[in-house]
Image (cartoon, rainbow, N blue to C red):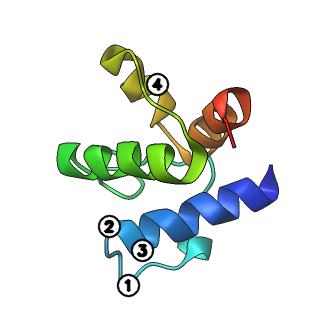
Amino acid sequence: MEQLKQELKDALIEALNLEDITREDIADEAPLFGDEGLGLDSIDALEIILILERHYGIRIENPSEGKAIFYSINTLAGYIEANRKR
């Protein structure tokens, strides 16, 4: 699970062009969206959806689940562990 979290952080930094952020700057339990944590927005959520599809073969079938899934690195990694196809 730790390796998956590190992979996710690296993928987010690359896909979202977070040039001034390192994986150490992203706390596993910190919110990814809003004023706390990384402060990502809805455009960034689309990029995360693409990461899930490309890297892990996961499609978010119910968009209303996205908020809970994308809350933090921990929730994202847990969802991937439970649903990955590769």
Mark 2–mark 1 distance (CA, rounded to whole Å)? 11 Å
Q: Residue at x 52, y 79 (%)?
A: 22
Q: Do callouts 2 and 4 mark residues in contact (Cβ within 8 Å)?
A: no
Residue 3 x/y as whole percent = 78, 61
Q: Which residue is mark 4?
A: 68
Q: Residue at x 52, y 48 (%)?
A: 30
**Neighbour tally class for label 3: few under 14, some 14-19, many 20 plus, Cα within 10 Å:** few
Is residue 17 visible in the rendered image? The answer is yes
Task: Name which residue type carries label 3.
Answer: Glu
Q: Which residue is mark 3?
A: 14
Q: Which mark is residue 20?
A: 1
Q: Which residue is mark 2?
A: 16
Q: Residue at x 30, y 54 (%)?
A: 39
Image vertical order of residue 83 relative to residue 38, above or below: above
Mark 4–mark 3 distance (CA, rounded to whole Å)? 23 Å
Task: Name which residue type carries label 1.
Answer: Asp
Q: Residue at x 63, y 52 (%)?
A: 28
